[in-house]
Amino acid sequence: MKLPIALLSLPLVLATSGCVASIGNRASDKPGAEGAKGGDPEDAADKLEKKQRELDYAKMELDIAKMSAAADARESDASVQEATQKLEVVKKDRDNFKALEKPSKLADKQLDIDRAAWRMEETRQELAELEQMYKKEDFAAQTKELVLSRGKKNLEFAQRGLDLAKKEQDGLTTHDLPKRETELDQSVERAEKALAEATAKKEKGAAETKLKLLRAEHRVAEAQRELDKAHAKEKAPDKEPKA
């Protein structure tokens, strides 16, 4: 009796299926297969490289922040120094004006007044002497009138010179010198404000720079931690139970 062909081929089909299954099971145990620990090694290496780049960038940003901080500090120091020097200059100008220039100008103008007053008094005395002399002696009327006229005119000029000197002194003491003194005081005030502003700006810049550096340092530290974690994860032993 002959068996059907399908029944004769059944053992061969079963044997072939078993071999294929066995080969598939062995393939699944190989490293790098789907489901293996750690996934794709190339992907893990990419992640480590990315973490390293992030750390390098953070370090570069920190270096740039330090250089920027140094430049800002130099600029702030220069501004404060310049403002300090300007304040010293205007203070010296003001102090020199009050201690030397103002008293000197007042004394000089007072000297002009004293000279003018003396010239007027001297001229007055000379005129009085002439008038007294012409009363006692007999001189030609024309000569007498000419001499007395000259004396009176000299006295008039002396009086006008004295009045002018007094007006100049009045203008000096009530306008010119007070105006100059006010201008110098205002210059000192502006210089003091400029110095205070430069100092405040320097302090603010120093605080902002400190904050920037701290943030940059924290970014470096965070990037370093992330990189260390990635390295530790990559080196960790396989804890999955073996079949």
Image (tube, rainbow, N blue to C red):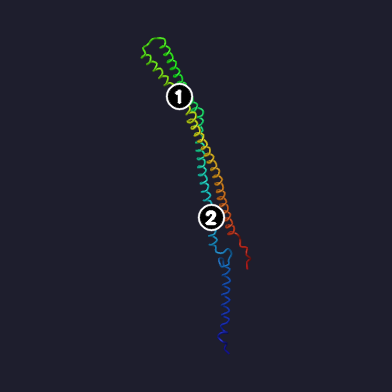
Quadrant (top left/top right/bottom left/bottom right) for the N terminus: bottom right
Q: Is residue 35 above or below residue 93?
A: below
Q: Residue furthest top?
A: 137
**Residue 105 percent location from the top left of the image:** 47, 26
Pick the residue in front: 103 or 81: 103
**Which tag, 1 or 2, sits closer to the chain's start?**
2
Q: Is residue 126 above or below residue 91?
A: above
Q: Secondary structure at mark 2?
A: helix
Q: Secondary structure at mark 1?
A: helix
**Residue 141 percent location from the top left of the image:** 37, 13
Q: Which mark is residue 54?
A: 2
Q: Residues within 10 Å of mark 1 (few under 14, many from 20)?
A: some
Q: Nearer the viewer, mark 1 or mark 2?
A: 1
Q: Residue at 54% across / 62% down in the picture?
A: 43
List the residue tagged with mark 1: 163
Q: Residue at 49% across / 26% down in the picture?
A: 106
Q: Amino acid at mark 1?
A: Asp
**Residue 165 percent location from the top left of the image:** 45, 25
Mark 1 to mark 2 CA distance (whole Å): 88 Å
Q: Amino acid at mark 2?
A: Glu
Q: Is residue 91 above or below residue 2?
A: above
